[in-house]
Amino acid sequence: MGLMYLKIYTRSFIADESGATAVEYALLASILSIGVLFLLESIGNNISNDFMQIGNAVKSQKTNANVP
C-alpha cells in the first residue's frame, strides 16, 4: 500500500505545473525590473547633463553681462 501511494504521489508531483508558473512569473518580473533600472539610470544621466548645461549657460551669461 505504501509503495503504491508513493508511486501515485510521485506521478502527480511530476505532472503538477503550478510551481513552474510561479517561477516563470518571478523570472519575468526580475527581467523587467532590471530593464526598468537601466532605463531610469539612462534618463537620470540625461536629466543631470541637461541641468549641468543649463547651469553653465546661466553662469556664462552672468559672467558676460558683468553683473555684480
Image: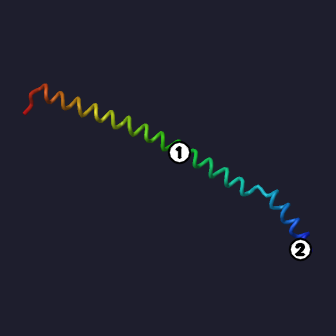
Residue 34 vs residue 6: left or right? left
Q: Residue at x 62, y 49 (%)?
A: 27
- The percent position of residue 10, horizontal first and vertical second, equals 84, 63
Q: Are marks 1 and 2 in contact (CB under 8 Å)?
A: no
User: Which residue is more in the foreground, 4 or 29?
Assistant: 4
- The percent position of residue 4, horizontal first and vertical second, equals 91, 69
* Image quadrant in which the C terminus is located: top left
Q: How many marks?
A: 2
Image quadrant assignment for residue 59: top left
Residue 67 vs residue 25: left or right? left
Image quadrant assignment for residue 7: bottom right
Amino acid type, callout 2 = Gly
Image mark for residue 34: 1
Give the residue at the far bottom of this rendering. Answer: 1
- The percent position of residue 26, horizontal first and vertical second, equals 62, 52
Image mark for residue 23: none
Q: Which element carries disc 1, helix, strand or loop?
A: helix
Query: According to the image, label 2 marks what residue?
Result: 2
- The percent position of residue 34, horizontal first and vertical second, equals 53, 45
Amino acid type, callout 1 = Ile
Is the image coloured rainbow, by chain, by secondary structure, or in one colour?
A: rainbow
Give the residue at the far top of this rendering. Answer: 64
Image quadrant assignment for residue 17: bottom right
Q: Nearer the viewer, mark 1 or mark 2?
A: 2
Q: Residue at x 85, y 60 (%)?
A: 11
Residue 61 vs residue 43: left or right? left
Determine crowd level at label 2: few under 14, some 14-19, many 20+ residues with C-alpha closer than 10 A. few
Q: Residue at x 58, y 45 (%)?
A: 31
Among numbered discs 1 and 2, the one appearing first in the sequence:
2
Q: Residue at x 23, y 31 (%)?
A: 56
Q: Which element carries disc 2, helix, strand or loop?
A: helix
